[in-house]
Amino acid sequence: MRNRRGQTILEYTLIVVIILGVMIAMKDYVKRGIQGRWKSATDDFGDQYDPQSVNSITNYATQVQANTIISTTNAVDAIQGLGQWTNRVDTSDSVETKVGFTQVGD
């Protein structure tokens, strides 16, 4: 009976060693499989941004409205008795629009 118990332990140890050997031998294949999955997943996101082959549509609009009012009250010089009056009103409206298409590369 003692020999059977030792034989069983030896068989289990041999099975564990064989399984570990297979796992060590398969590690490169598993690693490549995982890397392939990651590459496939990142390729599904689409192409990366390349500034040398980009096409873009540009819509740009700027609108400016400016008002300037300057008023000076009547100033009297005590010595000469002269007065001044300054009045200035500036109003400007401008709209700038740019629409275009930019193609770089092919």
Image (cartoon, grey):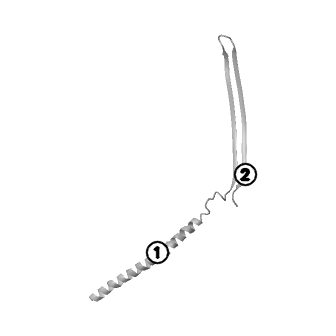
Circle 1: residue type: Lys
Q: Which residue is mark 1?
A: 27
Residue 16 placement: quadrant:
bottom left
Q: Which residue is mark 2?
A: 100
Residue 48 % position (x, y): 61, 61
Circle 2 packing at 10 Å, graded few (<14), some (14-19), many (20+), is few
| Kind of element beneath mark 2 | strand
Residue 19 placement: quadrant:
bottom left
Task: Give the position of the C terminus as an image quadrant.
Answer: bottom right
Circle 2: residue type: Gly
Residue situated in front as seen by the camera: 21 or 3: 21
Residue situated in front as seen by the camera: 37 or 77: 77
Which numbered disc, 2 or 1, marks the residue that appears first in the sequence?
1
Q: Residue furthest left?
A: 2
Residue 67 % position (x, y): 69, 32
Residue 38 placement: quadrant:
bottom right
On screen, residue 68 above or below 58:
above
Task: Give the position of the N terminus as an image quadrant.
Answer: bottom left
On screen, residue 86 above or below 62:
above
Write the residue at 69% across / 51% down: 58
Q: Is residue 16 left or right of residue 85?
A: left
Write the residue at 40% across / 78% down: 20
Q: CA distance from mark 2 to mark 1?
A: 54 Å
Residue 44 % position (x, y): 59, 66
Residue 90 % position (x, y): 71, 30
| Kind of element beneath mark 1 | helix
In the drawing, what numbered circle is on residue 72? none
Write the residue at 72% across / 41% down: 95
Write the residue at 69% across / 15% down: 83
